[in-house]
Amino acid sequence: MLQLIEISLICVGIHVCFLEGMIFESLRIEKYLVKLQWIIKPLYDCLPCMASFWTCIILWKIDIKSMLIVCGINAIIASVLQFFDNTKLPENE
């Protein structure tokens, strides 16, 4: 179970590195290339989608149960990140 949490955190780290203003932002494939969405979502663009690809790569096997657990963890993390992105926190005075 700890390894699945680790895989989920790796997915989050990769996802965050490709966000606007981060180190790999310049490597992003733009959204207007709709034909490539099935490639870029599992690589770095969608946390729940990343579970299938990165779980297989890190575990070196196809394990549906592990992929679903990582997908669930990633979905929870994505919800939390979206909540904080939409919420303005009070600035320090």
Image (cartoon, rainbow, N blue to C red):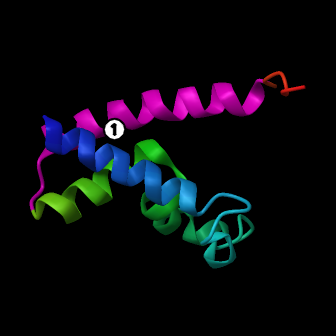
Choose top left, top right, bottom left or bottom right for residue 60.
bottom left
Residue 10 in view, yes or no? yes
Which residue in the rendered view is the most extreme toward the right? 93
Task: Specify whether residue 8 is painted magenta.
Answer: no
90 displayed left or right of 51: right
Name the residue at 25% across, 39% down. 5
Quadrant of the rendered image containing residue 3: top left
Residue 46, horizontal then vertical, whole percent: 51, 49
Which residue is outermost to the bottom? 27
Name the dominant secondary structure of the magenta segment: helix
The magenta segment is 61-87
Question: Residue 72 colored magenta?
Answer: yes
Q: Quadrant of the N terminus?
A: top left
Q: Which residue is mark 1?
A: 71
Crowd rating for badge 1 (residues with CA inside 10 Å; few <14, some 14–19, many 20+): many
Image point (45%, 54%), residue name: 13
Q: Nearer the viewer, residue 8 or 46?
A: 8
Residue that extends furthest to the front in the rendered view of this protein: 93
Place of residue 28 in the rendered image (x, y in percent of width and height, measured from the top left):
63, 72
Q: Residue at x 19, y 61 (%)?
A: 58
